[in-house]
Amino acid sequence: MRTHRASRTAVKVGRFMAVLARQPRLAPLLPKGAAESMERLMLHTGLLKPWMLRLYGARWYGRLIHAIEQRTVPGQVLCVGLRKRFMDDETRAAIAEGKRQVLVVGAGLDTLSWRLAREYPDVTFLELDHPASQAMKREALEGMGPLPPNLHLVGVDLARTPLEEGLSQAAVWRKDVPSVVIAEAVLMYLEEVHVAAFLEALRRSTGPGSRLLCTCFRWEVEGRPTMGAGTRRLISESLRLAGEPLLWIVGNEELGPFLARHGFRQDASPGRVELHRRYLEPAGLSEVPVSLFEFPVVADKE
């Protein structure tokens, strides 16, 4: 199968999930079925090979990943898995509260919509992503079985097309319905003015009580760096060279007021948004680190 196009970050995330799924202590923390379905999708596209899965399961490879992380960003791989768990849990909770639409912006190789659409047939699931990425993903998912009728994959180049125009291409989307909008690992690649425009468009395109779930990047937490200066330069430069430069870095103290200016109220309750506290401590894994530079955000439309 021709892969069309997938961002390097999306491929890296999928491979990180495969690594975590082969670590007995950490695999139970992943959303049910997430790693397995991503593996199937990536094997179908050729972005993952059987030999890679054998490699990821080797004990020496796990030790190598750990050693690299200790010298760069401890807990970076685990952060990917826990943010997937966070999005899964929060989406399910929002549906239980009465949200009837789920929009995933820039889903990449993520399978949340595909998985949950089967469990919640009365909820509309819509993905907006680059046309080439969506063509690749649709072909792979169809190879895994019939698509749920409530799952809609729409190809839109949001770098050139405003969000509202993209939503207008999906006849199923209703602006008056309480919704969940997921923008995982998306906003940090936009300039601040475009993040603001995105939030304003969401406010106009969703019903009362809608919720935004996203992730953001930060360089510091309470005055302490989230990584060393050398690692910071390495990550920034590697993303720039990959064509995915970091454009919006936001501190904790700035984010709440920024969201409020654009019609969203942030919930920064530690027990809800701190991944270590929410997932590792209850699992008896308090000694396991999780990186802090990418963090989850919950914000409700006011």
Image (tube, rainbow, N blue to C red):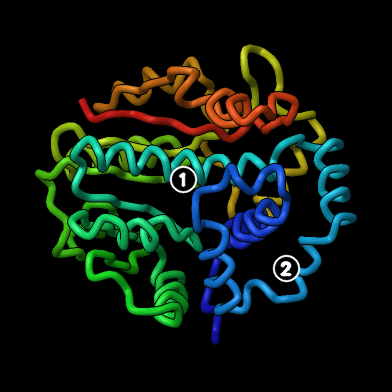
Would you say residue 297 is visible in this rendering?
yes
Image spot of residue 21 (x, y percent):
65, 55
Q: What residue appears at the point 66 percent right and 50 percent down from the top-left corner?
A: 239
- Residue 178 horizontal side relative to residue 259, left or right: left
Mark 1: give few (<14), some (14-19) or many (20+) Cα within 10 Å. Answer: many
Count of labels in the image: 2
Left or right, 150 with respect to 187, comes to left
Residue at image position (69%, 40%) is: 76
Q: Secondary structure at mark 1?
A: loop
Q: Nearer the viewer, residue 116 or 42?
A: 116
Residue 39 position within the rendered picture, expressed as x and y whole percent measured from the top left: 59, 67
- Closest to the observer: 114 or 127? 114
Quadrant of image for the C terminus = top left
Tell me if I can see residue 236 in this picture: no
User: Which residue appears at 28% of the width and 50% of the height?
Assistant: 102
Residue extending farthest left: 176
Which percent across, then down, holds residue 34? 51, 56
Residue with the mark numbered 1? 184
Q: Secondary structure at mark 2?
A: helix
Kindly identify the residue that appears in the image at 50 percent across and 63 percent down.
109
CB atoms of marks 1 and 2 within 8 Å: no
Tell me the amino acid under the disc marked 2: Leu
Considering only vertical position in the picture, is 262 above or below 30?
above
Q: Which residue occupies the extreme top position in the image?
A: 222
Q: Is residue 272 above or below residue 72?
A: above
Which residue is disc 2 drawn over? 53
- The type of residue carrying mark 1 is Glu
Q: Tell whether 68 sits left or right of 89.
A: right
